[in-house]
Amino acid sequence: MALNIRKAERGDLPRMMELIHELAAYEKAPQEVTVSMAEFEEAGFSANPVWGAFVGEVDGQIVGMSLYYIRYSTWKGRRLYLEDLIITEAARGLGYGKLLLDETIRFAEAQGYSGIMWQVLDWNEPAINFYKKYNCTFDGEWINVSINLN
């Protein structure tokens, strides 16, 4: 079945949140999703949105999404950060992830960004093997650091 890719709209948020929860369960961390729907909506659809996304639909049903934001590197300039590339479990293996990632890459190129960055869990072999097809650089040197404020 053909995948229709388009920019995410406000009405897509409930389904996008379902995909986020599905990913969190897959990553064995369902309790880690604490963002509210109000925050998710405000961050993506306010006057100054901090994220953008593409959704992929089959027969009008969203089966995947690519959510990104702009980051700045003092070494490389503006880059896209791919926060999540999610394909619902039932639709994996059909090439939809490739189509969504390709669209995200085209978007970054059209914006003149110097590249795209993202993270993948070291145990997620299907995702790692998928990204290897893109001749990506896997960096084992840097350590993730974060501070939770609430």
Image: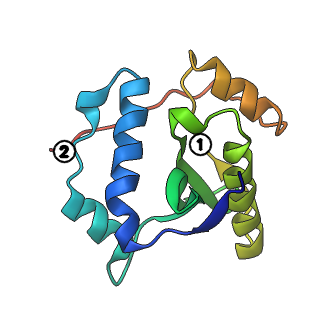
SS for callout 1: loop
Which residue is drawn at the image coordinates 83% and 34% (left, top)?
Answer: 133
Image quarter hosting the C terminus:
top left
Q: Nearer the viewer, residue 29 or 114?
A: 29
Which residue is drawn at the image coordinates 27% and 33% (left, top)?
Answer: 32
Q: How far from the left and from the top, in percent, is residue 66?
A: 56, 54
Q: How far from the left and from the top, in percent, is residue 121?
A: 54, 24
SS for callout 2: loop
Residue 136, located in which quarter of the rendered image? Answer: top right
Q: Give left or right: position of 38 versus 78.
A: left
Q: Nearer the viewer, residue 67 or 144?
A: 67
Residue at mark 1: 118
Which residue is drawn at the image coordinates 24% and 49% (left, top)?
Answer: 35
Disc 2 versus disc 1: nearer the observer: 1
Q: Is residue 127 visible?
A: yes
Q: Is residue 140 visible?
A: no
Mark 1 belongs to which amino acid? Answer: Trp
Specify few, some or many for label 1: CA neighbours under 10 Å numbering under 14, 14-19, or 20 or more.
few
Q: Give left or right: position of 1 versus 150.
A: right
The answer to which of marks 2 and 1 sits earlier in the sequence is: 1
Which residue is drawn at the image coordinates 64% and 64% (left, top)?
Answer: 5
- Please say if 43 is above or below 33: below
Residue at mark 2: 149
CA separation in Å, label 2 and label 1: 22 Å
Q: How far from the left and from the top, in percent, is residue 46?
A: 32, 79
